[in-house]
Image: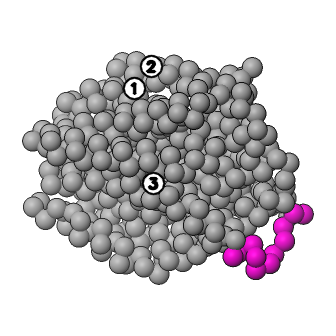
């Protein structure tokens, strides 16, 4: 019964989340077939800045999901509406900060890149992408809040439809703006902005009718959002640690040249397929665990956690087999540049290993969000981040491969530390 409940919520999110890396797959494929690796490296660097900024604020979705799920379990729709209003207010404030400081943010990012190799073409492409994409900040951050509300309420099919429409718009825009209109990096950026606006309109049309009758506007709500932001400070730091490690892979790879940056971008596509699929199960657990916890049903919480881990283990094995059998063909679809195809031949081992070392951390992240365990999420991420840098500096003579060894160690340590913490709470 618990597996069926998880699956009913998980399958729409799995399909929705698979569509996201598929979209990234199309972005990489479109740019990867342009004549120079500089386009792909530049798009990777530009999108990295956006990813760091927006994912750094991912606590907007996580906190909304956990608090809405618990309010829904406690049959308190007024509190659900308050959580959404506070989240939107925080999203608007943070997006204003990003837009005001966008030039400083990009300049700081460029200062972190290696000066040992010529990256001028890649940096120019990155700036083009960033200067367009950053203007989607207000709708992108509000989308996190609206998505969090729907997941917390268990309305994962709505999220599926929203993302499918969004990604379809992005796909069509990519094809029109890059190969047809020849806008190259600018075209990919414009397509992403258009997709985010489409997603916002779709999500708002489904969330607003559910909360309008419970919405009350007064100063106490927005003052309360300051308290909410304070409570989520640990989630913010946790996101910073995650982005520090992910960004380090791309930034440090610039020391090895554009081919290394582009190679890592392609390997990361394989990881994104894993992460978004596993997150489908994790999102279901966020909702189910949060609602059961809100109803004080400890036995159900334990049952959902154990079932979710079993489903994810099976999924990880399937991924390993798929990457082992099809990895080379996927790479050839992503790029036709001979130097990249040759460079990637020595990375198939990491690609196959990624599902096994990473699946547990995604699932237990969902559990921690549902339980609102922000401190434990921060603590496990800190342990994993320390492991990442220790492993890298002990093995950095391996070059770019040291980055992937460190990343695999990071994901494995994160999952195992989370498992230990969950066991200590006696939920499993």
Is label 2 or label 3 in front? 3
The residue under label 1 is 356
View extreme (right): residue = 213
Which residue is found at the position 75% from the left and 72% from the top?
221
Does residue 148 appear to the left or right of 48 in the view shown? Answer: right
Residue 59 placement (x, y as % from top left): 55, 57
User: Which is more toward the observer, 31 or 139?
Assistant: 139
Measured in 3D between alpha carbons, the distance from the residue under mark 3 to the one under mark 1, in whole angstroms, is 22 Å
- Quadrant in the picture for the N terminus: top right
Is label 3 or label 1 in front? 3
The residue under label 3 is 238
Measured in 3D between alpha carbons, the distance from the residue under mark 2 to the one under mark 3, in whole angstroms, is 28 Å
Magenta span includes 218? yes
- Quadrant in the picture for the C terminus: top right
Residue 317 tag number: 2
Does residue 75 appear to the left or right of 412 in the view shown? Answer: right
Name the image quarter holding residue 407.
top left
Magenta residue span: 213-223
Lower position in the chain sequence, tag 2 or tag 1 = 2
Which residue is found at the position 34% from the left and 71% from the top?
106
Query: Quick one: label 3, few (<14), some, or many (20+) residues within 10 Å?
Result: many
Which residue is found at the position 79% from the left and 40% from the top?
295
């Amino acid at each position: 019964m618990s597996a069926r409940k998880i699956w009913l919520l998980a399958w729409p999110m799995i399909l929705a989340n698979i569509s996201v890396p598929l979209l990234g797959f199309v972005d990489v494929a479109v740019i990867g077939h342009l004549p120079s690796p500089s386009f792909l490296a530049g798009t990777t660097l530009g999108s990295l800045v956006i990813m760091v900024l927006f994912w750094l604020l991912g606590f907007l979705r996580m906190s909304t999901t956990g608090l809405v799920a618990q309010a829904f379990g406690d049959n308190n729709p007024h509190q659900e509406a308050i959580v959404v209003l506070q989240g939107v207010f925080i999203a608007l404030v943070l997006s204003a900060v990003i837009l005001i400081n966008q030039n400083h943010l990009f300049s700081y990012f460029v200062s972190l890149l290696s000066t040992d190799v010529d990256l001028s073409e890649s940096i120019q492409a990155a700036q083009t992408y960033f200067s367009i994409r950053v203007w989607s900040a207000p709708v992108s951050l509000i989308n996190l809040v609206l998505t969090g509300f729907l997941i917390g309420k268990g309305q994962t099919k709505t999220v599926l439809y929203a993302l499918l429409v969004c990604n379809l718009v992005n796909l069509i825009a990519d094809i029109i703006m890059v190969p047809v209109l020849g806008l190259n990096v600018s075209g990919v950026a414009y397509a992403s902005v258009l997709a985010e606006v489409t997603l916002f309109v779709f999500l708002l049309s489904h969330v607003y009718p559910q909360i309008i009758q419970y919405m009350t506007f007064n100063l106490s709500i927005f003052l309360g959002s300051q308290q909410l932001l304070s409570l989520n400070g640990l989630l913010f730091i946790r996101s910073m640690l995650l982005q520090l490690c992910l960004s380090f892979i791309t930034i440090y790879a610039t020391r090895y040249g554009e081919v290394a940056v582009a190679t890592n971008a392609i390997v990361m596509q394989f990881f994104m397929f894993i992460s978004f699929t596993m997150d489908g199960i994790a999102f279901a657990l966020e909702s189910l665990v949060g609602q059961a916890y809100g109803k004080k049903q400890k036995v159900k919480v334990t049952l959902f956690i154990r079932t979710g881990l079993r489903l994810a283990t099976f999924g990880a094995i399937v991924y390993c087999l798929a990457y082992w059998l099809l990895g080379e063909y996927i790479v050839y679809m992503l790029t036709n540049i001979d130097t990249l195809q040759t460079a990637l031949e020595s990375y198939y081992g990491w690609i196959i290993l990624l599902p096994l070392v990473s699946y547990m951390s995604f699932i237990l992240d969902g559990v921690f969000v549902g339980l609102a365990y922000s401190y434990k999420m921060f603590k496990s991420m800190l342990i994993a981040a320390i492991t990442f840098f220790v492993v890298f500096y002990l093995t950095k003579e391996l070059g770019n491969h040291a980055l992937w060894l460190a990343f695999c160690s990071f994901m494995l340590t994160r999952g195992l530390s989370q498992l230990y913490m969950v066991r200590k709470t006696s939920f499993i």
